[in-house]
Amino acid sequence: MSGHSKWHNIQARKGKSDAQRGKIFTKIGREIAVVVKTGGADPVSNSKLRDVIAKAKQNNMPNDSIQRAIKKATGELSNVNYEETTYEGYGVGGSAVIVECLTDNKNRTAGDVRHTFDKHGGSLGATGCVSYLFKRKGVIILEKKEGLDSDEILMQALEAGAKDVLEDEDSFTIETAPDELNSVVESLNKNGIEVLEYSVEQVPDMYVELDEAKQTQFEKMIDALEDLDDVQNVYHNVK
């Protein structure tokens, strides 16, 4: 069991400033608005809403803010309608990037995303230009703690329906089929295994490596994309 971990990214995100956390809360609020519109405001019957609420809590979003976002989506408070849109493109060194957005103005969002790619040596491509390099998977992150046995994690995860378990020095990453994600999380929780974070993501089939200069340039582009108000998720295949 060896592989790439998101643990350090999670640590960095949770250590962001109040202003940056506010931006994260705004993005999650948009996600709540979309899933409530499509599946209703009851997390018991709307599994997507349940997942977004879990994500909000993982990011320490206040309950009041979560409930306010739900009320906005149901029309109890003034609201804006958001559309899901995805962009694909290339970073330096032929790297592949997928950008998932929620927007109330596609022209604005497309211009902002294109400008960010261009500014950092990348290029926006056509739909499908890089998505074939990724597979949609459920991803569960467990923090390595004393008493967590790697063989036990592997056995329990596979018994629960997981496809693979990856390990590095700080964490375990469990991969599932997208529709098996919730059942695997519930099984782990029932067995007393604490889940740090879980979500459905675009996972690359293979990673590419960049030299130091290109890596720095690429990371600046990813940071700039993630900082755009309309961008929800950014996936790439750079190690």
Image (spheres, rainbow, N blue to C red):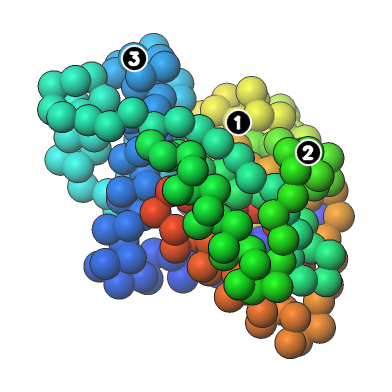
CA gap between label 1 and label 2 equals: 25 Å
Q: Is residue 208 left or right of residue 68?
A: right
Circle nearer the N terminus (1, 2): 2
Q: Kindly identify the residue that appears in the image at 17 percent across and 35 percent down.
A: 68
Q: Kindly identify the residue that appears in the image at 57 percent across and 63 percent down.
A: 115
Q: Is residue 27 visible?
A: yes
Residue 182 is situated, as x and y percent measured from the top left of the image, at: 55, 28
Residue type for callout 2: Gly
In this rendering, the label closer to the viewer, 1 or 2: 2
CA gap between label 3 and label 2 equals: 31 Å
Residue 78 is situated, as x and y percent measured from the top left of the image, at: 15, 29
Q: Kindly identify the residue that appears in the image at 33 percent across and 65 percent down.
A: 20
Contact between labelled residues 3 and 1, with CB atoms less than 8 Å apart? no
Q: Kindly identify the residue that appears in the image at 86 percent across and 55 percent down.
A: 206
- Label 2 sits on residue: 128
Image vertical order of residue 44 relative to residue 83, above or below: above
Q: Which mark is residue 181?
A: 1
Q: Where on the picture, by quarter, is residue 14? A: bottom left
Mark 1: secondary structure: helix
